[in-house]
Image (cartoon, grey):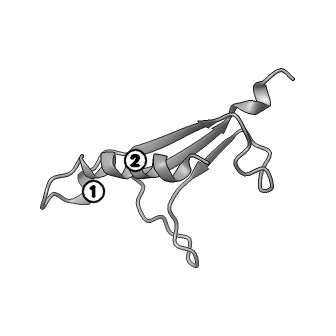
Amino acid sequence: MGFPLSSFYQKILFLALIFSGQDYSELPPTIMITILHYPLFSQETDRFHAVFHLREDHEHFIWSPHIEFHAIDLSQFMVK
C-alpha cells in the first residue's frame, strides 16, 4: 500500500509552508490525493472516493481543517 510514503511527503510539503514563529492558522489547506487501481477499504465502503480528516477518537473534533486525505479507486471504472 502506498499510504505511508505518500503521507511522509505530504507532511514535508506541509511543514515547508510555514516559518518559525508563524501562526498555524496562516497555513493554506493541504490536500493529499491518492489514486489507486484497487479498493483500499473494500470491507468498509463500496464508494470509489473516500475523504479523510484527522479527528479525535472520543469527541470527534477535527485536529486541523487544513489537512485532508482523498483516496480514489479507479478499479471500479476498469473494463473487465
Horizontal relation, residue 42 to residue 8: left or right = right
Q: Please rate how many residues cluster around mark 1, counting C-alpha atoms within 10 Å: few if below 14, some from 14 to 19, many from 20.
A: few
Task: For marks 2 and 1, give the one nearer the viewer.
Answer: 2
Residue at (24%, 51%) from the top-left corner? 26
Circle 1 residue: 25
Horizontal relation, residue 27 to residue 22: left or right = right
- Helix, strand or loop at mark 2: helix
- Helix, strand or loop at mark 1: helix
Q: Please rate how many residues cluster around mark 2, counting C-alpha atoms within 10 Å: few if below 14, some from 14 to 19, many from 20.
A: some
Residue at (56%, 40%) from the top-left corner? 34
Amino acid type, label 1: Ser
Amino acid type, label 2: Gln
40 lies above or below 34: below
Circle 2 residue: 10
Horizontal relation, residue 27 to residue 31: left or right = left
Nearer-the-camera pick, 25 or 12: 12
The extreme left residue here reads 21
List x then y, in percent, for residue 69. Answer: 52, 48
> How far apart, in angstroms, are the residues tagged by discs 2 and 1?
18 Å
Dot 2 or dot 1: first in sequence order is 2
List x then y, in percent, for residue 10. Answer: 40, 47
Residue at (52%, 72%) from the top-left corner? 56
Horizontal relation, residue 36 to residue 39: left or right = left
Nearer-the-camera pick, 43 or 61: 43
Tally of marks:
2
List x then y, in percent, for residue 42. Answer: 78, 50
Nearer-the-camera pick, 14 or 29: 14
The extreme right residue here reads 80
List x then y, in percent, for residue 80. Answer: 87, 23
The extreme top residue here reads 79
Picture quarter containing residue 77?
top right
